[in-house]
Every structure is written in structure tokens, then in C-alpha cells.
Image (spheres, rainbow, N blue to C red):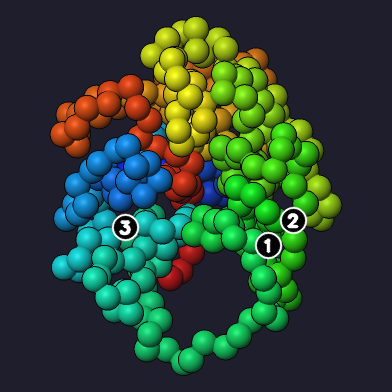
Amino acid sequence: MSTLKRARESSLAVLHCNLPTNNKTQTPEAIDFSTQDAFHQENQGNPFKSYPAYITNPKYDVLNLTPHSSCAPFKSLTFIDDPSRIKILQSCNGLLLCCNFRPNRLDTTYYIYNPTTKHYTPQFFQKIDPWRPSSRPFVAPSNVQFENGVFWNGAIHWVSDWGGWLCFDVEEEQMRDILMPSGDGDVRLYRYFRESGDHLHLVEVYGSDNLQFDVYEMEKDHSGWFVKYQVDLNPVAAAFPEMVRGYADPIDLHSYAFSILCVVHEETDEDSFMVLHLPNKARRYNFKDNSFRKLHDFAPLRSRVGVGGDSSLEFEYFDAYQFIESFACV
């Protein structure tokens, strides 16, 4: 199950409860967003929007990505009675890394939570043995997005708007450079960078009115990128004219309102798809035939957060967290 987070997270939570029968990689089944958690993150990236700075109990939605829907894994993070609100930081193999909100970051408590089993474990980093240096010191490009790292193939990967891209090999404790696809100019206009089904995907969109782009995949040996899927969103824009902004957004530099929440790599390319976020909508786009269908319609933005801007986008890929059913112990 795939879960997309929205804090700007608007979370529609739906859990696929079938038990896995083998050790094959599990496809994300739902996407989870936290509607009220997305405020903090969007306000950081968009100076033209203003949201409440603090929501005490964010609610989550999960978009079901499988044909069989079942009970939602959670609507809010209530697995621990913490006076501070809990938010999701990362997801990996069915486990969620969460933390509470404290004025003093040194007092922050982190939790590893399994929504399937409802088990969790707290991590009090300030109380454990001292940290030791890992790898040798390195100079990082000035704009590497360390907060949005992706774990894949035994390494954590980071991208940046300009400058080099990096990965850290966890086993060998070595930092390495990542080769980048050829782009237009020095600034990277990436719109998606995530892992699915043990495949690392990247999307870059150049041109303010361009609705045709490629989904790249990294070679297993990190030797480079290749085009995995080709996308044409012109039929989507024709079906949903509210995507047309009439101006280039100052954040994503595009004149069409859309974001990629999730690329789902199925066992066959014919079944693989991505989840698009359009104004007040989530749609499933099939790579094979460019078809698309409804996943979810969100309530108008102003009815949830008390502001205007119904045609604006609420979620980006970093607001979404994939979830698969897991019985891993925590």
C-alpha cells in the first residue's frame, strides 16, 4: 500500500489487508497525506501562501492503489499519548519514522511505527551512546536536499537544484557522487525523486508549458539513468481545464497545475502507473496507454484550511509517504 502524506498532508488512509505470501517486493497499496501537516512544509517553500503554524492533531488520508480496499491503517497518529503532535518524516518498507513537535529540538522523540501491527519503538537519540563519525568529511553542494533523502539499493540518495547529487553507501560508509541525466542548463527542474518496487525514479520537467516528459530509472550499479516511461499529459489537461494557470508558477515554474505524488513500479510495465495531483483531485495515470482514471476528489482547499486558492496544489511528492503491509518487528 502506498501512503501519501500531507501536512500539507491531506491523508486519505486505506489499507490493503491481504497478507503477503512470499518475499517478493510489495507494491505500495495506498498513498497517505496529512491534510493539516502540509501547512508547515508548503509555507516553507511558497512565500505566497499562508497557513496556520500549528495544528494539534493532524488527520491523514490514504489513497488506495489496489483494487481491493479495506480498513485505513490510521486516520491520525495516536499510537502514543504524546502531548506534542506527531508527524511522519519518512517511510520505508512498511515502517514509518515519526517524531513529535518540541520547541527544543534536543528534546525531540523519534518513533519507528508499524501501522500494520500497531507496534512502535521510541528512539531517544540524545540519551544513547555518543555518535561516531561515519565516512570521511566531505564538501556538499550548497543546495543538496538532505531532508528528502531516498533509501535505495543499500544507499541514501540526495538531489539538488544545482550542483552535484550524492549518495551514501550505508554498508561501506562512503559518500559518492551520483551521475545526473543530461538537462537544460545548470538548474535542475526535478519534480519527483522516489523509490518504488526496488526501482529509483526521477522526473524532470523543462519548459513552462511542456506536458510531455520522461520518467528516468537508475541503473542498479549506479552507472547512470535511462528512460523508463514516457508521459504525455495533454489529454489530462484537456479533460481538466482547471490545470491551466495562465501564468508560470513562481515555485515550480510551470503554467499547468499538477504534481507527481507517486510512481508505482508493478511487476510488468503494462501495469505500472503514477499518481497525479491536480487541483482538488488525485488521478491514476497508466504509462502503457496514457489513460487515466479517478482515485480521489479532495474537498475544496478553503473548506479545509480556511483560505482561498481552490485551484492551487496542496501536495508534492515529498508530502507523500508510501505504505505497504509489513509484519516487521519494531
- Would you say residue 121 is visible in this rendering? yes
Residue 135 picture location, percent across and down: 68, 80
Q: Quadrant of residue 51?
A: top left
| Front disc: 3 or 1 | 1
The answer for how far apart the CA atoms under marks 3 and 2 are is: 30 Å
How crowded pointer 1 is (Cα within 10 Å; few <14, some 14-19, many 20+) is rated as many
Q: Residue at x 55, y 10 (%)?
A: 235
- Name the element at disc 3: strand
Q: Nearer the viewer, residue 276 or 305?
A: 305
Residue 42 picture location, percent across and down: 35, 44
Q: Residue at x 31, y 57 (%)?
A: 87
Q: Amino acid at mark 1?
A: Cys
Q: Residue at x 64, y 42 (%)?
A: 188
The answer for how far apart the CA atoms under marks 3 and 1 are is: 25 Å
Residue 80 picture location, percent across and down: 24, 67
Q: Which residue is mark 3?
A: 87
Q: Which disc number belongs to residue 178?
A: 2
Q: Amino acid at mark 2?
A: Ile
The answer for how far apart the CA atoms under marks 2 and 1 are is: 6 Å
Q: Nearer the viewer, residue 189 or 292?
A: 189
Q: Residue at x 70, y 56 (%)?
A: 164
Q: Which disc number belongs to residue 324?
A: none
- Would you say residue 72 is visible in this rendering? no
Q: Which disc number belongs to residue 167?
A: 1
